[in-house]
Amino acid sequence: ILAISSTYTIQYSDQIHKIIRSTFNLLGYREIDLNSKNNKNKGSKPIVILGYYRVAQAFIQEIVQTHHHMKDQILVVDFSPVAKQSLDHMGIECIYGDISNPGALHHAGVENAQLIISSTSDTFLKGTTNLKLVQVLRELCPNSRLIMTAENENQARVLYHEGAHYVLQPFKMVGSSLIPTVLTGLNGNLNMMREQDLENIENDFLKRELYLKKGRTEK
């Protein structure tokens, strides 16, 4: 059932995205008003992240835990009020907007960014692709450096030719990082690696809980 529902969700992601966006608007979570001259985020931030999905979430968690001084340099554009609430709680600025809409990107002030990151693969993007985004961004933000995401080398090649400054390939990165783990397993040392990884996870969890608790206390 899960496999069928996942396939259905991906196949009809654009339609689902439109329904969810309309529902959020009805609930009061308004997207950027493209007709308002006062709504443009003129200052923007040096780093703009388009979409708040798995890689972006991991990146933000790393920023909060180990590079706290960079928080004020980051702006996230996402259409999910849940994402905005989470980011607000961590002290990361988030603008509610549809990244597939060039007008929304313009009014978010992304053209002022030094670095723009699209860390979501095409499978999970709604209403756009990394190729469409890089084409829009090259015109909208000619002076910004663009980090895009590809699901395979062919996509990466196209994105580079279209002007991406760097292309993330998550599956390739995971595959490369698996090599030392496999070699360690063959040498019979996985238990040690397991203990180290579990310790790091527990430490990260405690740091995150302490940070969130501190945020709640300050409020």
Image: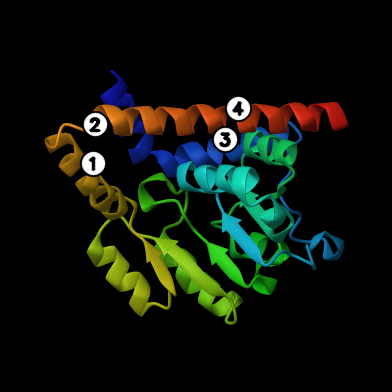
Is there any visible trace of residue 54 in the rendered image? yes
The residue carrying mark 1 is: 181
The tag earlier along the polypeptide, 2 or 4, is: 2
Give the Cα distance between marks 1 and 4. Answer: 25 Å
Given contact means CB atoms under 8 Å apart, are the residues at marks 3 and 2 in contact? no
Amino acid at circle 3 = Ile
Question: At which x and y percent is residue 201?
Answer: 47, 31
Alpha carbon separation for disc pair 4 and 3: 34 Å
According to the picture, the residue beneath numbered tag 2 turns out to be 190
Residue 158 left/right relative to 206:
left
Residue at the image position 80 percent from the left and 68 percent from the top: 42
At 34% from the left and 79% from the top, the residue drawn is 161
Whole-angstrom CA distance, mark 1 to mark 2, is: 8 Å
Query: What is the CA distance from the residue labelled 2 to the residue labelled 4?
Result: 24 Å
As shown in the figure, which amino acid type bears the numbered disc 1?
A: Thr
**SS for dot 4:** helix
Tag 1: Cα neighbours inside 10 Å, few (<14), some, or many (≥20)? Answer: some
N-terminal label among 4 and 3: 3
The residue that label 4 is drawn on is 206
**In the depicted view, which residue is nearer to us: 70 or 46?**
70
Going by the numbered disc 2, the residue's amino acid type is: Leu
Q: Is residue 185 left or right of residue 9?
A: left
Considering only order in the chain, which callout, 2 or 1, is on the residue closer to the N terminus?
1
Instruction: Tell me if label 2 and label 4 are in contact, CB under 8 Å.
Output: no
Q: Nearer the viewer, mark 2 or mark 4?
A: 2
Mark before the other along the chain sequence, 1 or 4: 1
**Horizontal placement of 186 versus 145: left or right?**
left
Q: Residue at x 78, y 33 (%)?
A: 215
Pointers 1 and 2 in contact (C-beta within 8 Å): yes
